[in-house]
Image: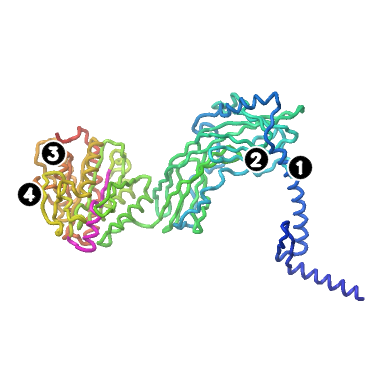
Amino acid sequence: MNKIVKTVVITCFAVLLCLAGYRVYDKTSTGAVERHEGVQIGQLYLNAAASEKNNRKTSVVSASEKNNRKTSVVSADEGSLQGKQQEVQLAFELQPVEIQAEKAVADNLRADNTVTTLAVSSDSSDIPDGELQQETQQAQTEQTDSTEEDDGITYVDPKVKPAEFYSRTRYLDGSFEICWYPVRDAVAYKVYGIKVNSDGSIDEKALIDRVEDTRYIINDIETSAVYHYGVKPVFDGDPKKSTLKRIDLCKPEEISEIRTNRISDTSVNIKWTASRGASGYKISYRTLNGYFKDLTEVNTNSLNADIKIDKDYIFRVVPFYDNGFTRIRTEGSALAKYYNRSGDVVSLDHQKYTSAECYEDIEMLMMRYSDIMKTSVLGLSERGREIIDITIGNEDSESALLVVCEIHAREYITTAVMMRIVEYYLQNYYGTLDDTKVCDLLRKICIHFVVMANPDGLEISQNLLPRWKANADGINVNANFPYNFRSSGNRLEGTYTGDSAASSKEAQVIVDITGRLSEKYRNFGVLSYHAMGQIVFGSYKEENEVLQERITEMYDIVIDSTKYEDAGKLDGGKAYGNYREYLIYEVGVPAITIEMGATVCPCDVSDYSTTFTKNKFVPFRIAAAISEWKQEGTGSE
């Protein structure tokens, strides 16, 4: 009876352990006690059995690998062959070629480059280093009917296809490593360099090396070059035949730049510099948790992606070479930020358009339109703020227009309005303005916008002295140019003209860009924007007929577009150190000065929208006129 009760109790206890789980303590190989929590009895037994089986396999594999990974030994009659042929290891490498002509690869890439809406936006934290150091290949994992497993080793048939023969290919710090599955009874493997015809057929092959291992390192590779190799098993006294297993290798070139171009609130075009040697590109975007989520793959260097409104994105593009069974990618990745804000970037609904706001808007426009817009820092102000050149159009054309704003501090209406005009042109770049297709005009001319020539003075006017017009050093920049210069005025009042011509950093920057553009472009003109009075300065007092004709043409365009008044007697051509007089009489460049504000400086915000409406076509129409100038330049003698 006692035995029956005891048996029942043990059985019930065992059932409870199976249901609830228990802690298993096991002694490790080091003598430490290891605790396994929540393991059920049946599971513990199965895991132990599986572990024992794996241990036995590991033991066999280790012994086999030990034999396979011995230092390569070549027979006495072949020893000299190996030493000599290693010297010509890369004899049959092809020079860099266009991958599209080399091999039709990446058939699995999507033909349609349009991407569905992204589900998650990215944040703006730093990118994990590990994400950019991913493995440069994809391991071949498919097992085929021609493979068999013995003692933990996967063997392949000697006549198997290359895609089933090679197990891994990767790029390792300037070298390629190719690995393959062992072939049963093979005593060694011969590595060949292959010369391939344009139609893909093998023209010639040369023995490079003989190895007993199932891997081979190819050193001293060149980026974007295509290499053709082959591996063939060797049998000792066995008539088995095997075919050469060809493999094509290439490390693609790194991408130098990604550009973005806004299509709409929900769509963006991503374009990047083409990578020589790449057969395709993987595009991903950063998620909120800092990882990158795959977006799509394309075989062109452009992509239209659907995006969400008011979300921030970091796009990543990774070029890769696909040889049919594995991929080799670059070491790094190209990244691009894109902040998708709805509506216009530049706002004209407040009076104090600050320097910080201007810099931020330039950055936002660059994210939206970096494919059609460029920026460069021309120099620094007296207090170290950047003076930026915004460029749209064809820099390799024969024509250019320079637009300069806010030489006087309190005239920051010119900065706000011109920034909105720049955005207006970018928004309509592929559309039509004034009965002219914008991109067609901008193929014939380059427009440079210096929208904020005196950023220090702007800050002083907005925060300390509203009527301040000078720079941070008290110099009236528009009286500091090297024409009819006189030193006079008071620094404290902001009327000082400077110790010498172009002594202010702001004037130096403007003189420099004016000189460079006038030398580079055969046809060149300048618009200088000021505020206030709604008048136009366009007179000329000398006898250069070409210069007179071009100034008059520019003047007529401005008057017709804005309906502003002629400055009349205010323009006598004798101003001291004035920028427009410097342009016309010293450099020989046609130039117009436009005073845009209707109210007293600093102009009221009520002026901004109407001023934009009156001036939005002025730079566009002036650029169209300059692009049609056919006569030789008008440089002064």
> Which of the two labelled residues, at mark 1 and mark 2, occupies the earlier sequence position?
1
Crowding at label 1, few (<14), some or many (≥20) Cα neighbours within 10 Å?
A: few
| Mark sitting on residue 548 | 3
Crowding at label 4, few (<14), some or many (≥20) Cα neighbours within 10 Å?
A: few
**Marks 1 and 2, how far apart at CA:** 17 Å
Q: Is residue 559 in view?
A: no
Q: In the rendered image, which quarter contains the C terminus?
A: top left
Q: Is residue 338 in view?
A: yes
> Which of the two labelled residues, at mark 4 and mark 2, occupies the earlier sequence position?
2
- Pointers 3 and 4 in contact (CB under 8 A)? no
**Marks 4 and 1, how far apart at CA:** 102 Å
**Marks 3 and 4, how far apart at CA:** 18 Å
SS at mark 1 in the image: strand
**Marks 3 and 2, how far apart at CA:** 76 Å
| Residue located beneath label 4 in the image | 569
SS at mark 2 in the image: strand
> Which of the two labelled residues, at mark 3 and mark 4, occupies the earlier sequence position?
3
Residue range (magenta): 447-467
Membership of 460 in magenta stretch:
yes
> Which of the two labelled residues, at mark 4 and mark 1, occupies the earlier sequence position?
1
| Residue located beneath label 2 in the image | 167
**Marks 1 and 3, how far apart at CA:** 93 Å
Q: Position of residue 191 (x, y in %)?
A: 64, 30
Crowding at label 3, few (<14), some or many (≥20) Cα neighbours within 10 Å?
A: some
Circle 1: residue type: Asp
